[in-house]
Image (tube, rainbow, N blue to C red):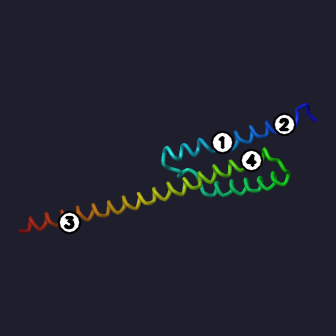
Amino acid sequence: MTNLSTHEVEAIGYVGGVVLALCLAPQIIQVVRTKSAEDISYAWQGLYLVGLSINLAYLVLLGAVAGYVAVIIEIALLLVLVVCKFFFDRKRAQQVRNEGQFMQDERLVVEGDEKSDRLSLAV
């Protein structure tokens, strides 16, 4: 079929697989830098994980070590991304709740000041 040895073919598989697996690394770095994963959907992550899991099963059944090692790396990086998204989404939701509480407290103070101004004018 080809003039390449089995080792050379395996090497190509490992290199290609690792490069593909590392494609998630820049996304993880971006999420950590910006402390936001709002643009990444859980649906995409779930479907991606299902697809990777099916591919992993297939490659294990074939005995394609170069393929399934890369898929395992990719699954690990995807799980890091899922954890980052969960953490930053939760943190953002807490900030929004805190800001909402702050705004509500501030409104009460302003309304209280207006009432005290009216009382001082009435006296």
Question: At 58% from the left edge and 51% from the top edge, which residue is drawn?
Answer: 40
Task: Work out whether residue 62 or residue 7 is closer to the camera in this orientation and state it.
Answer: 7
Residue at which label 2 appears? 7
- Along the line of sight, the residue nearer the viewer: 66 or 98: 66
Point out which mark residue 69 bears.
Answer: 4
Q: Distance between the residues labelled 3 and 1?
A: 57 Å
Amino acid found under the numbered disc labelled 1? Leu
Q: Earlier in the sequence, mark 1 or mark 2?
A: 2
> What amino acid type should be assigned to the residue bearing mark 3?
Gly
N-terminal label among 3 and 1: 1
The alpha-carbon separation of the residues under discs 1 and 4 comes to 12 Å
Q: Residue 112 carries which label?
A: 3
Pick the residue in front: 47 or 107: 47
Percent from the top left, x then y, of residue 36? 50, 50
Q: Distance between the residues labelled 4 and 2?
A: 16 Å
| Label 1: which secondary element | loop
Image marks 1 and 2: residues in contact by CB distance under 8 Å: no
Question: What amino acid is found at the position of numbered circle 2 in the picture?
Answer: His
Q: Which of marks 4 and 1 precedes in the sequence?
A: 1
Disc 1 + disc 4, Cβ < 8 Å: no
**Label 1 vs label 2, nearer the camera:** 2
Counting residues from the start of the chain, the first of labels 2 and 3 encountered is 2
**Amino acid beneath label 4:** Val
Foreground mark, 1 or 4? 4
Q: Residue furthest left?
A: 123
| 81 relative to 53 in the view: left or right | left
